[in-house]
Image (tube, rainbow, N blue to C red):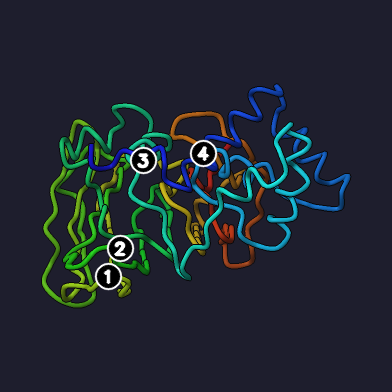
């Protein structure tokens, strides 16, 4: 399997050793966090979770100090975890990992059904760095426009397009328009049984490894039936910045809004907090250095 991790790879060995030590001691991540706090080190549960899954490694001075504190606490000889860390080049990006992708989408997700065999190679040559989404909810309480700007980096030579998938709140596949500001129209297809639009957006030219490109597109819906209650972004690799703006029509102001984050599609969010609208009928979500998972804004009307 080309995407299977090598068990002797430093990233994998660190994750395996750390996770096995946690299991051997029967320590939940909350206890690890509290132990570190008692030594004046503040790390989030999410950060510790990424270490044991191999999605990230300790790199910053505070993280390396945390490793030194944790080794005796986990019953490991001094230097055990440190020896498994290697210095990564600046701008290092996690490899394409099908297991991690399914960890966010779940097994046999709508996206996997849409892409079929292509799911295993879904945007494998690119990594998103920054994503900005602006969503509009019209007077009929329906998301009628999504504007997206994203910055991608090539992790291999010669990628030509970015594949994007959006789930619509309507079953009318002919009632949408997918537009980009420059170049030819992207190739799109609609899967009515899944309410999914798939588009292949050209990058303008073939990218060399580590080159970046800015991708812009707008998805508009002309549907008149259906009600929208949320918009979310699924991240399978870490993201530097994600900005989600949702603007409501003055005649469709919701009773309540929430920002939320969850690890996997369809599961209960790990965090959910009330959000307010500003004087322009808009709310926004701006998590920084986003870990993999599902980020979104949900809203509801009382009537």
Q: CA distance from mark 1 to mark 2?
A: 5 Å
Question: For the point 27% across and 38% down, which residue is it?
Answer: 111
Q: Which residue is mark 4?
A: 53
Q: Earlier in the sequence, mark 1 or mark 4?
A: 4
Q: Which residue is mark 2?
A: 155
Q: CA distance from mark 3 to mark 2?
A: 19 Å
Question: For the point 21% across and 70% down, which residue is it?
Answer: 203
Q: CA distance from mark 1 to mark 4?
A: 26 Å
Q: Secondary structure at mark 3?
A: loop
Q: Secondary structure at mark 4?
A: helix
Q: CA distance from mark 2 to mark 4?
A: 21 Å
Is 86 displayed left or right of 258 in the figure? Answer: left
In contact (CB < 8 Å): disc 2 and disc 4: no
Q: Secondary structure at mark 1?
A: loop
Q: Which residue is mark 1?
A: 209
Q: Can you see residue 132?
A: no
Q: Which mark is residue 6?
A: 3
Residue 132, above or below 98? below
Q: Earlier in the sequence, mark 2 or mark 4?
A: 4
Residue 144, above or below 273? below
Residue 218 drawn at (x, y percent): 29, 64
Crowdedness near tag 2: few (<14), some (14–19) or many (≥20) residues, C-alpha within 10 Å:
many
Query: In which image quadrant can residue 285 be found?
Result: bottom right
């Amino acid at each position: 399997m080309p995407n299977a991790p090598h068990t002797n790879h430093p990233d994998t060995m660190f994750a395996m050793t750390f996770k096995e030590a946690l299991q051997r001691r029967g320590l939940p991540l909350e206890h690890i966090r509290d132990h570190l706090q008692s030594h004046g080190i503040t790390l989030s549960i999410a950060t510790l979770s990424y270490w044991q899954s191999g999605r990230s490694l300790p790199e910053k001075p505070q993280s390396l100090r945390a490793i030194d504190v944790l080794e005796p606490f986990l019953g490991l000889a001094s230097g055990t975890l440190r020896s498994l860390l290697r210095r990564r080049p600046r701008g290092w990006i996690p490899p394409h990992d099908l297991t991690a992708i399914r960890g966010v989408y779940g097994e046999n997700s709508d996206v996997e059904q849409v892409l079929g065999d292509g799911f295993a190679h879904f945007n494998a040559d690119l990594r998103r760095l920054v994503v900005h989404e602006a969503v509009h909810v019209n007077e009929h309480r329906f998301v009628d426009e999504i504007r997206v700007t994203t910055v991608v980096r090539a992790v291999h030579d010669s990628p030509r397009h970015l594949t994007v998938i959006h789930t619509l709140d309507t079953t009318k596949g002919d009632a949408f328009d997918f537009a980009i500001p420059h170049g030819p129209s992207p190739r799109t297809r609609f899967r009515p049984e899944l309410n999914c639009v798939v588009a292949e957006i050209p990058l303008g030219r073939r990218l060399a490894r580590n080159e970046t490109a800015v991708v812009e597109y707008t998805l508009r819906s002309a549907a008149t039936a259906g009600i929208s209650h949320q918009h979310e972004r699924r991240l399978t690799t870490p993201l530097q910045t994600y900005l989600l703006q949702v603007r409501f029509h003055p005649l469709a102001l919701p009773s309540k809004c929430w920002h939320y984050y969850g690890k996997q599609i369809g599961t209960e969010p790990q965090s959910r907090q009330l959000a307010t609208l500003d004087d322009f009928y808009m709310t926004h979500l701006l998590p920084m250095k986003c870990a993999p998972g599902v980020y979104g804004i949900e809203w509801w009307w009382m009537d």
